Amino acid sequence: MPEDETTCRTAARPLPPQAGRDAGRPVPGPDAAAGQPVPSDRSGPAAPSGPEGSAPSDPPVPGAPVPSAPPSVWRTRLLVAGIALAALNLRPAITSLGALLEEVRDGLGISGATAGLLTSLPSLCFAVFGVMAPRLAKRGGPAPVLLAGMAAIAAGVLLRPFAGGTAGFLAGSALALAGIALSNVLMPVAVKRWFPDRVGTMTGLYSMTLALGTALAAASAVPAAEAFGGSWRAGLAVWAIPALAAVLLWLPLARVRTARRRGRTDGPGAAADRKLPGQREHERTAAAPVPAPAPEPEPAPGPARDPGSAPGPAPGPSDGTARAPRITRSPTAWALGCFFGFQSTAAYITMGWLPQIFRDAGLPASTAGALLAVTMGLGVPLSFLLPRIAAGMRHQSALAAALGLSGLLGYAGLYVAPAAGAWAWALLLGISNCAFPLVLTLIGMRSRTTAGVIRLSAFAQSTGYLISVPGPLLIGVLYQHSGGWGLPLALMSGLMVVQLGLGVRAGRQRYIEDEGRRPFPAGPAARTPAG
């Protein structure tokens, strides 16, 4: 009969994706006594078992988006302060040593080649320990790892001047640099995860405070040593104080993030998932997943795409049905890693050897430290402005080229008149050093997802720091064997030319997910008719 046929067709239709099994039916639990139906959440493809804005005791369906709640203002402010204070501690262990390098060499009796190894140690530690950050963050979240990084910085900076001998100094430095390495990788991740709608602003904030800490350490290392009776050991150890302050600030944040792993909170801007006693058994029964209707057969196999998207290949993040693309297949990831490596080489050569260049030119130690502070301090305003400017541009190649040209002019000036134009060369090199906040911004812009940023940050920084290891060491060897700065400056200029080209390539608008998903032809049979 027609009516029966219509009824059968209606009953056989699959439920719409917004409707769950419990929509419109009483569910045992907090609302059972009133017999109220549990409406579905229409904000996503899967519906939670409670309405948006319900009491925290209403558990969500596993796999469904967590309903939003008003953000915790104090926690957001604490995160902003924690990120800024952590960034403040990411360079003083390096630049304070650069300003006092001659005193450390005399006090420990080390050669120029060993001093070059000491200036290469940051890059080596960043490459070795940076790869551990994503795995540690996956287990406990970024906050506990950042807390551990700040604790390692404080311990290493405090212990290395008093460890005794070159080996103890190197061991203490390695401990501090390991903490810096973990924090380096996780800072872009923390910004992308906790402030996804303010990536440019927050990247500018922590880049600015990073540059501020770099400049303060360079400027105050020599005066601090003089204030303690000319003791270079005290001038280095004093920088454990801000690291200890960062540890105290990250302690409550780490506790909150650890509680999130136990299902009690989900950070700023997300609702708390609090369980009442005796409710877990109810969740396993009432919130069981509903079998989905059988999908319609695809007309032909095609590339993986997000469910619900328009037909055709749509590059984007993995939908869970296919593996994430290999980051080593992305030319943009390699360009970012190499660009990061050459800008790190220039930065650590500057931080480690620029004061010595000025002192060899006849300038006093305090003036050489002040010049390094100017070079690093110029990054304070530029590190805040550059990420915002870069985020508003379609391509960032022009910015990378301008920074590279500034470095070339600075090195040329150091070769021609290191003392006469010292302040101008310091300013030019300070502009060039702002390639660091630029590459951090590019890391956040070259992936579509937080998981992609984690992988790209770890890959780019680990690859880059490995590339930058030989640079400061080669400068020290050339300086010791040539007896001057002609050959070292020529090498630095050549490296800057390579950095300029890599920055232009990394500045093009690309996404690593798109490049990683491109099929790689296995041979002539895989080629298209067009070639």
Image (cartoon, rainbow, N blue to C red):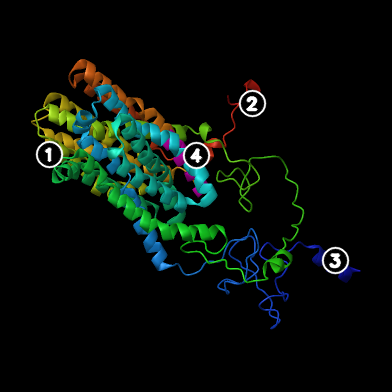
Q: Is residue 363 visible?
A: yes
Residue 463 position in % (x across, y down): 43, 32
Assess whether mark 3 and mark 1 are in contact (beta carbons under 8 angstroms).
no
Query: Which residue is the site of mark 4?
Result: 512
Residue type, mark 3 in image: Cys
Residue type, mark 1 in image: Ser
Query: Which residue is the site of mark 2?
Result: 526
Quadrant occupied by the C terminus:
top right
Q: Earlier in the sequence, mark 3 or mark 4?
A: 3
Q: Secondary structure at mark 1?
A: helix
Of badges 1 and 4, nearer the viewer stands: 1
Query: Which residue is the site of mark 1?
Result: 366
Of badges 2 and 1, nearer the viewer stands: 1
Q: Secondary structure at mark 2?
A: helix
Q: Is residue 449 visible?
A: no
Which residue corresponds to the image point at 71% horizontal and 40% vertical from the top-left? 300
